């Protein structure tokens, strides 16, 4: 009897092994990641809201299959430009030509961003796979983003000069350096003094937003911390003036400009 039960148990274990998702699927943002199917994004959102005092909200998420509880888009408008992009690059919002697929606010809108842990917990309990967005500006961090290779050079240069950097969020294609809040007027004066500002360089300031780890990135893969925030309290942030020269120089000539703002 023990041998029979042992053989049955072995067959059952082998069957369960064959039902597990292949490792390659876990890098596909349209396939639920077992590591993020529970509370990983909710926990990250609560940490941002409570420990760091960053206003956050859920992003719309990618289409096919959408995040649980994601808003259902309306019919595709007639006369849309170009072919429909592949499922991994499509957004769950109604815009078939969305420039930041899945990585932007929709419902709720950006003004709903909050540090209220009850609201944050409710959002991610309803939509546990929703991307995590930081509403930048005001009293919250701002950010400067640039192509990954250029950003790696800039970060190495700044740290080699002894510069203390803040958190750095990274996707496979772009890095975002978090900086202290700045006004649009202040940024305008800073950039006006430059001979040239590369189109690959993007600024996330007042009225903007930034995709945070461990969200799925619109171009594939996931957002991660290249430089993690401090474990406790509000992370230290450099002024934008301290980093912009190195970022402009590093991103000059880099690909990744144009009108599409994919992360």
Image (cartoon, rainbow, N blue to C red):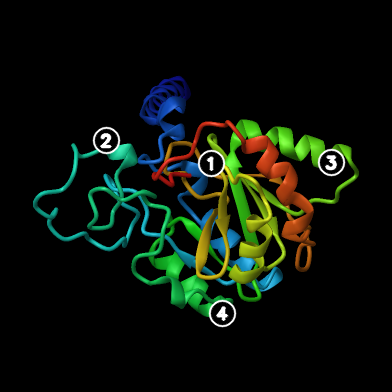
Q: Which mark is nearer the camera, 3 or 4?
A: 3
**93 left or right of 112 in image:** left
Q: Which secondary structure, mark 4?
A: loop
Residue 259 percent coordinates (x, y): 39, 45
Q: Which secondary structure, mark 3?
A: helix
Quadrant assignment, res 70: bottom left
Q: Which mark is residue 86?
A: 2
Q: Which mark is nearer the camera, 2 or 4?
A: 2
Q: Which secondary structure, mark 2?
A: loop
Using a 10 Å C-alpha cutoff, classify the residue at mark 3 as few (fewer than 14 neighbours), some (14 to 19) or many (20 or more).
few
- Check disc 4 and report the residue beneath it: 116
Q: Which mark is nearer the camera, 1 or 4?
A: 1
Q: Which mark is residue 159?
A: 3
**3D distance between C-alphas at marks 2 and 3:** 39 Å
Using a 10 Å C-alpha cutoff, classify the residue at mark 1 as few (fewer than 14 neighbours), some (14 to 19) or many (20 or more).
many
**3D distance between C-alphas at marks 1 and 3:** 22 Å
Q: Which mark is nearer the camera, 2 or 3?
A: 3
- Check disc 1 and report the residue beneath it: 200
Residue 17 percent coordinates (x, y): 43, 26
Quick one: label 2 or label 3, which is nearer the N terminus?
2
**8 left or right of 166 in image:** left
**3D distance between C-alphas at marks 3 and 4:** 35 Å
**3D distance between C-alphas at marks 1 and 2:** 24 Å
Q: Nearer the viewer, residue 86 or 120?
A: 86
**3D distance between C-alphas at marks 1 and 4:** 34 Å
Question: Can you say whether 45 is above or below 201 in the image?
Answer: below
């Amino acid at each position: 009897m023990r041998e029979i039960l042992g053989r049955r148990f072995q067959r059952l274990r082998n069957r369960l092994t064959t039902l597990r998702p292949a490792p390659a699927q876990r890098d596909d943002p349209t396939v639920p990641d077992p590591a993020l199917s529970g509370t990983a994004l909710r926990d990250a959102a609560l940490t941002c809201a409570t420990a760091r005092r960053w206003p956050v909200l859920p992003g719309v998420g990618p289409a096919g299959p959408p995040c649980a509880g994601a808003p259902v888009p309306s019919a595709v408008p007639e006369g849309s430009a170009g072919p429909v992009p592949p499922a991994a690059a499509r957004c769950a919002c109604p815009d078939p030509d969305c420039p930041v697929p899945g990585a932007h606010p929709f419902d709720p809108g950006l003004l709903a961003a909050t540090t209220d842990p009850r609201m944050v917990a409710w959002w991610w309990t309803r939509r546990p796979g929703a991307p995590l967005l930081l509403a930048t500006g005001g009293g919250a961090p701002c950010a400067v983003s640039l192509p990954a290779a250029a950003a790696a050079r800039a970060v190495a240069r700044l740290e080699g000069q002894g510069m203390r950097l803040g958190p750095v969020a990274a996707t496979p294609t772009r890095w975002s350096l978090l900086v202290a809040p700045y006004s649009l007027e202040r940024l305008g004066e800073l950039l006006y003094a430059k001979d040239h500002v590369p189109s690959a360089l993007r600024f996330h300031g007042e009225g903007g937003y930034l995709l945070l780890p461990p969200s799925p990135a619109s171009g594939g893969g996931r957002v991660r911390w290249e430089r993690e925030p401090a474990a406790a309290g509000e992370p230290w942030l450099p002024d934008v003036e301290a980093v912009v020269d190195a970022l402009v120089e590093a991103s000059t000539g880099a690909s990744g400009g144009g009108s599409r703002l994919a992360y």
